[in-house]
Image (tube, grey):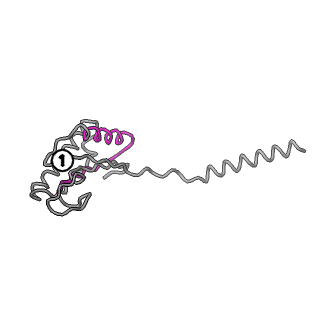
Amino acid sequence: MLKKFLIASAAGLLLAACQQQAASPPPAAPLPQAYTVYFDTGQSALSPQATATVSQAAAAFKQGGTAVGVRGHTDTVGDPAFNLQLSLQRADAVKDALQRNGVPAAAILTGAVGEQNLPVATADNVPERRNRSVDIAISRQAL
């Protein structure tokens, strides 16, 4: 009698564990990964630190990414038309570096906003390091 009770109890626990496992929701899809590359004033060349950040982003893409968004910014110092062009040069520099690190060109969507939509809102002619940047977003969905 005790043997039957123990077998029934073990079977019940095993069944409950299986039901709990089956009822567990699937793991959530990971959120996009974001990286920021910083630039010196008026420059679009990648520093060693910027190159390392781009390498990290490329490695993240290789871990299952399907698309990379690249968006260039400038601070508010200088002419807005020049800054728009500079932000594009920065975005292109990051795109080129991503490609050198194995990210296919077709997976990269590049854009530039110059002084618009800044990471840190500032008045005109304010040098802000965080605005002299390119944002990189690694996505698991096509852009």
Q: Is residue 82 left or right of residue 23?
A: left
Task: Name the quadrant containing residue 95.
Answer: top left
Using the image as rendered, state which of residue 120 and residue 65 is in the foreground: 120
* Residue 9, horizontal then vertical, whole percent: 79, 47
* Residue 125, horizontal then vertical, whole percent: 14, 59
Decide whether residue 71 is among the magenta residues: yes
Q: Is residue 124 left or right of residue 59?
A: left
Q: Is residue 88 above or below residue 120?
A: above
Q: Residues within 10 Å of mark 1 (few under 14, many from 20)?
A: many
* Residue 44, horizontal then vertical, whole percent: 16, 45
Q: Is residue 50 left or right of residue 34?
A: left
* Secondary element type, mark 1: helix
Toward the bottom, the furthest residue is 123
User: The residue under label 1 is which amino acid type?
Assistant: Arg
Decide whether residue 142 is among the magenta residues: no
Give the total number of marks visible in the rendering: 1
- Residue position marked by numbered label 1 in the rendering: 90
Q: Residue at x 23, y 47 (%)?
A: 38
Using the image as rendered, state which of residue 16 and residue 32 is in the foreground: 32
Q: Residue at x 85, y 46 (%)?
A: 5
Task: Name the quadrant containing residue 55.
Answer: top left
Toward the right, the furthest residue is 1
Q: Residue at x 43, y 50 (%)?
A: 30
Segment colored magenta: 50-75
